[in-house]
Image (cartoon, rainbow, N blue to C red):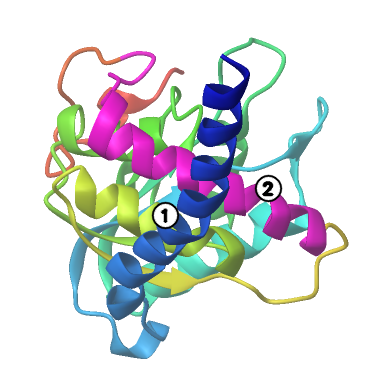
Amino acid sequence: MLWVSFLLFFAALAAAPLMNWWVHSRARPYVLPAERVEHAQVGIVLGALVYGKSGRLSPVLEDRVDTAIALYKAGKVERLLMSGDHGKSNYDEVNAMRRYARERGVPDDQIFTDHAGFNTYDTMARARRVFLVENAVVITNGFHLDRAVFLARSAGIRAQGVVADKRAYLDASYNDSREFLARCKAVLNVYLWRPDPTFLGPEIPITGSAKASHDD
């Protein structure tokens, strides 16, 4: 058993860089500057930290939503899908994102909200299976974008990606380290484990009314 454990450990060490390379290779051709992305049904905005009761967006999330707003106003996407964590009544990423975009000129009926986007895998699975998204621009920060595009395309979405970085982030080194392991998990989810998202629910087509996704 000890030798088996050692062999499994070293196999994992060897496989991890290959899994990271695979995610990069599958996603990188579709990561483009904003001006070069093709028109898509929707911009999918990945959630991140919001601050307390105020719902103020963290710098990382603010940059993601600002990038999505710019894409919407440039006519690159028809709608926005805000996907994040709203698993508790006292923590709500998606309505904070929706409010921020609405205050900056995006019509409320063009902002869909996914309240069960607890992780990137769930977001992309739900985008395809609940919101029936066929093509999208994925909007998140550079450290996260390859994995997000990889998972979107693996879910059956014709996805492009746009980097949302507008500043340097204090936790950049932590994000890079965490992302190495997260890419490995993404590969295992797609090719081996194939879990369902935490929640599914009734279909809310992205081509319909965004109000069907709102909780107010």
Q: Is residue 115 magenta?
A: no
Residue at figure coordinates x 14%, y 34% from the top left: 205
Which residue is denoted by mark 1 in the rendering?
Answer: 19
* Residue underneath mark 2: 178
Numbered tag placed on residue 131 in the rendering? none
The stretch of residues the image draws in magenta is 172-199
* Residue pictured at 13% horizontal, 47% vertical: 156
Pick the front one: 209 or 133: 133
**Where residue 131 appears, x then y in whole percent?**
20, 34
Q: Nearer the viewer, residue 169 or 20?
A: 20
Answer above or below: position of 63 versus 103. below
Question: Which residue is drawn at the image coordinates 33% and 71% (left, top)?
Answer: 25
Label 1 neighbour load within 10 Å: few <14, some 14-19, many 20+:
some
Q: Amino acid under label 2?
A: Arg
Describe residue 117's horizontal placement relative to residue 28 as left or right.
Answer: right
**Residue type (three-letter) at the residue carrying disc 1:** Met
Comparing marks 2 and 1, which lies closer to the viewer? 1
Rendering coords of residue 66 (x, y %): 57, 66
Query: Is 180 covered by the magenta stretch?
Result: yes
- Asked if residue 216 lies left or right of residue 124, the reply is right
Q: Main secondary structure of the magenta part?
A: helix
- 114 horizontally vs 126: left or right: right
Measured Cα–Cα span from mark 2 to mark 1:
14 Å
